Amino acid sequence: MRATQLDYKPLLLVPLLALLALPLVGSDFTWVTLTVAGLAMGMIIFIIASGLTLIFGLMDVLNFGHGVFIALGAFVASSVLGLMGDWTGSGEIWRNLVAVFPAMLVAMAVAGAIGLAFERFIVRPVYGQHLKQILITMGGMIIGEELIKVIWGPAQLPMPLPEGLRGSIFLGEAAISKYRLLAVAVGIIVFALLAWTLARTKIGLLIRAGVQDREMVESLGYRIGRLFVGVFVVGSALAGLGGVMWGLFQQNLVPQMGAQVNVLIFIVIIIGGLGSTTGALIGALLVGLMSNYVGFLLPAGTQFASIFLMVAVLLWRPQGVYPVANR
Amino acid sequence: MNSPLLTLEGVHTHIGAYHILHGVNLSIPRGQLTMLLGRNGAGKTTTLRTIMGLWHASRGSIQFNGRNITALPTPDIASLGVAYVPENMGIFADLTVKENMLLAARSARRADQIDTARLEWIFKLFPAVEKFWNHPAGKLSGGQKQMLAVSRAIVEPRELLIVDEPSKGLAPVIINNMIDAFQQLKASGVTILLVEQNIHFAKRLGDQVAVMDNGVVVHQGPMQALAGDEELQHSLLGLAL
């Protein structure tokens, strides 16, 4: 028997997909541009999906209302950025980042706080009842979207990138958007923090154990209900952060933006294996890359690319790339 | 103190529409090993789960160390010093043996904070736990998983150790190892409640025995009395096993 080792095969899927796309795309520089764009999109989707996979995995809650925290985070951040016009209008990147950072923090705080109320009043009464969870969390999302319309209005809102984050840097003829580089960096930081928390702390150990066998965690003397609430709040806050990144990526906001991303993030967590953070990262990067390559090669097929990807992965590993044991 | 460590009085348990326990009366003396015997479906596992608060008693009372724990949530019962090893062993397959042990050591935040002397004692009882310390628990054999499950239950001092069918599915040589381990645990003063269907395992270990049938305890007394009375064995175990 060998000591713990990572199953490396799923990790190869991302470079494999990128290499497969290279001859199809043709131009090396276009391929670099598409690949960086795909990785950036994947990282943003990962930030959103990481919270949902933990909520799904640990709490066995089908939270179809996750999208409302994405929209909420984006709208809150747009208001914060609107108050910091001097900073976002500056061409200096450090001043832009000083504006974006508090916008992210406020968006996460608001999404986390609303997540706390959402768990208490909407999710808690339907623990263990999947059909009711789907219905009530979708209902919660609709109410959330209507409240966003009440506060920010029903019209589409612009969310322009801060001045210094606009445009691209060039590697030869390959154009790499500055903002996408920022998105990759934020995604890496979020993944590193989550991976460290899950692998190196007792809380992380409890979450990983809870994903596998909640009852046994309670039998060891831990109140898993508190852990549930904590994970739900963190998951909602991460969705809020993802909303900020997604809003700046799209550069405009609509109250239904969360619902539009919902299908994508469910595809990601199913590809990854419910409850697996590393799996969610791989799923998100695959979906991001696939969307960009297919969008370039066969624009009409973009809608189906992610679903095709999910089916292909599930044919290989029916419980996702990193299935969580005991579930 | 001579009062029993755990007492169940008239405990009824319902699971959904099913009425499983029909007034269980059971007394677990301190520092002794009590065997709970009975055929499949007699209510043994339900009794253990009701003690742990995993299913709540609909009637009756459960006293642990003089305290009423009938309505307490599971984590509170565990925190009072009750360790539980379920029938499926409850191993976290994706975690390493070390991580499984660290979870059970509630006072430790890192593996190096687990009581070293106690860990050495456990390694002597179950060498496989030390041998596979950094291995995924899901890769262990059935016997090794059972050893890990019991090790996890005793990684910190507990007053009561509850184990559901520790010999189930194990090879005879592993069963002998488990018997040795439980004898050493018993000698250390821990009170143990074991559910068993293997009468030979039960006879070699038990100080006390309780036999269940149809959701009630139909006999309780010293194991020696049962082991030495073939007629009683026939009437009880013929009925219940």
Image: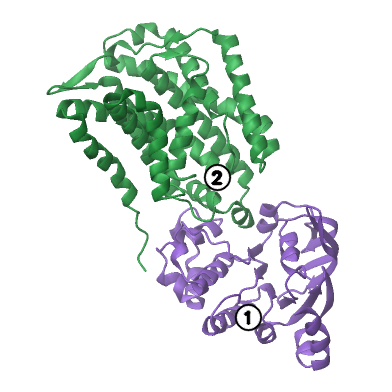
Give the secondary structure at mark 1.
helix
* Residue B23 in which image quadrant: bottom right
**The C terminus of chain B lies in quadrant:** bottom right
- Residue A10, percent from left and from top: 34, 48
**How is the model colour-coded?**
by chain
Q: Amino acid at mark 2?
A: Leu
Quadrant showing the N terminus of chain B = bottom right
Q: Are marks 1 and 2 in contact (CB under 8 Å)?
A: no
Q: Amino acid at mark 1?
A: Ala
- Quarter of the view holding residue A250: top left
What color does chain B have in the rendering? purple
Q: Which residue is mark 2?
A: A58
The mark lying in front, picked from 1 and 2, is 2
Q: Which chain is green?
A: A
Q: Position of residue B20 (x, y in %)?
A: 80, 62
Q: Is residue A188 left or right of residue B19?
A: left
Crowd around label 2: few <14 · some 14–19 · many ≥20 (10 Å): many
Which of the labelled discs sits on residue B187, or is there none?
Answer: 1
* Cα–Cα gap, marks 1 and 2: 39 Å
A55 in relation to A163, above or below:
below
* Chain of residue at mark 1: B
* Relative height, residue A140 to residue A18 (above, below): above
The residue under the point 77% across, 93% down is: B228
Rendered location of residue B13, percent (x, y): 81, 59
